[in-house]
Image (tube, coloured by chain):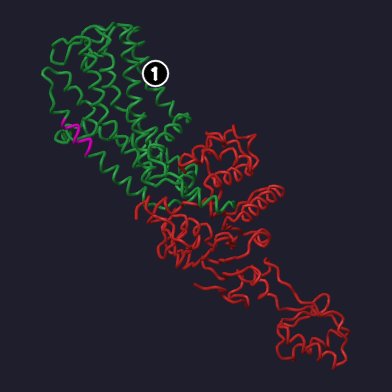
Chain colours: A red, B green
Amino acid sequence: MGRDGAPAVSGAPPIEARGLVKRYGRITAVDHVDLTVERGDVYGYLGPNGAGKTTSLRMLLGLIRPDEGSARLFGRDPLRDGAGALEGVAGFVEAPRFYPYLTGRRNLELCAALDGGDAKTRIERGLDTVDLSDRARDRFGGYSHGMRQRLGIAAALLRDPRLLVLDEPTTGLDPAGMRDMRRLIRRLADDGITVLLSSHLMGEVEELCDRVAIVRSGSVIYEGALAELLRTAAGGYRLRTSDDARALELCSSEPGISEAEATEDGLAFAADEPAAGALSLALAEAGIEIRALIPRSASLEELFFRLTEEDGNGGLPARERAS
Amino acid sequence: MSAAAAGDEASARRRRPRALTAYRWELRKLRAQKRTYIGLGAAVLVPCIFVVALMVEAGGPDEVPFGRYVRETGLAIPLILLIFGSIWLFPLITALVAGDIFATEDNHGTLKTILTRSVDRGQIFTAKLLAAFTYAFVALCLFAGTALLLGGLRFGFDPLTTLSGTTVSSSRGLTLIAASLGVYLLPTLAVASLALLLSIASRNSAAAVVGTLMFSLILQLIGIISGLDFLRPYLLSTQFNAWQGLLREPIDWAPIVRAAWVCACYGVPALLAGWIVFTRRDVAGG
């Protein structure tokens, strides 16, 4: 269907990618990536640098052609439906780029003109939202990195988006700039805008996102709810007793207990809740006093490294929700 | 109303922009860039230098058409300069913008910015094509206009002697000059088309500008090799002289007709290739 004839599919998810593959010569930058971002999600797309995050985003927005697979935005294919598929979609891939010889306002006017409709009326509001009204008459070439990022957000908001795609929006910002940017994203998400946030910053994703996909070497190695990921990945305990040496021997022989090891302040082991309960009884029967038995909570950062640096899947379900 | 609901409503009422909108913005971007004024400045400066040289020196360019009449009427000045301009000046002026107009987007990383708005690649291609052509047209008008104005002020607007030796009135002479510019525009636009293709394919402004100029100079070189005489009528460089058919009595339409199809043979495939590459290529980097 042509560019004007691509109505959004009612009820279709904001993003639905199936089997996306992109190869550059022998290198597979993106390897059969499946993604589903539902309405209202603040979706973290998490991976180390070079994992294929930006390439995936480019394919989602129709900037590059996948070698295999397809991507749909609200049910429309950017490659087949052209600009019509991007209705209600905004954001930026890598750093936002504008014309250095035009002022910030002029750049926004250009974007508004290319958006059509009444986007022009939203320029002042956009500048105000990102706190750039005072510098709007300055050329973009003279903007700091943070101002460029904020102008990118302002340009995205001109489209009154229902889906915001942001590629590492806080990269290069100072701490205050990062805080402000995260607050802005949170506010937009609270307003009901679906957000796809690509990042390699764990704290940022943990703070903002409710669902995540973790990518490694071009492949999605986990997709699902962040809370579920953290819960699933926990399951470990820290233990302090009156006799840690004997307790460690006991841990090693107790069924359901694994990865038992001595640490600086006691012992650590992996077990589910019933096994930990059985261990506590066994310790009591052996006359070993339990001074502390603390469930070990996993941080996203810890999980991320387990998932992206280990050969396997770090003991986690490979994909919470496979397509 | 939530932002998402507002977004739904905005999408529903939004009118898609036309290629004309993108074209207007391409012109605005050109007006904001120094490169544009380098070409337009050259288009004004060269006629100024030529007229000043005629005022300082006693002789004239007798060996070129209209050279003998250069001091008889200012109407001859733009015609002589069209001949000189075809060697490298106009290919260069044209390539300065046409060779840059796509590549600069790669350079600034802004292609992704405009391609993630509500315009299609085809619309962007059309807008840039029209902007490059508009610039070439404006440069040519400035070039000839400056030559005519300065030539007329210095040597008067007397009747013009044609290449057939007949004399035409000043008003008819002006009409013939305007028509000559129209014919001169054909190879100019063909050069612009080649520059556009190189700009898209190379993604590098300097490579596209230099490549276009090199191509023009190579064709000039082929044109002066006596063993390759049979190629001369089909060289793009030759078509820069087709307008001279208008300055004969009766008008010789053969070189003009040939210029039309020869220029189309150079320009249309270049534009077609440019279209295909631009509408299908990956927008990476930046």
From the viewer's perspective, tell me whether residue A100 is left or right of residue A302: left
In the rendered image, residue A18, in percent from the top left (x then y), is placed at 45, 67
Q: Can residue B11 be seen from the camera position used here?
A: yes
Please, what is the dominant secondary structure of the magenta stretch? helix
As shown in the figure, which amino acid type bears the numbered disc 1?
Answer: Leu
Give the quarter of the figure containing the N terminus of chain A. Answer: bottom left
Point 56% across, 48% down: residue = A95
- Is the residue marked by circle 1 packed among few (<14), some (14-19), or many (20+) residues within 10 Å? some
Point 66% across, 48% down: residue = A173
In terms of image quadrants, where is residue A211?
A: bottom right
From the viewer's perspective, tell me whether residue B247 is left or right of residue A159: left
The answer to which of B196 and A65 lies nearer the viewer is A65
In the rendered image, residue A89, in percent from the top left (x then y), is placed at 50, 52
Point 25% across, 26% down: residue = B184
Residue range in magenta is B257-264
User: Does the magenta segment cover residue B260?
Assistant: yes
In the rendered image, residue B280, in percent from the top left (x then y), is placed at 36, 52
Q: Secondary structure at mark 1?
A: helix
Point 20% across, 13% down: residue = B172
In the rendered image, residue A54, in percent from the top left (x then y), is placed at 52, 57
User: Does the magenta segment cover residue A132?
Assistant: no
Check disc 1 and report the residue beneath it: B45
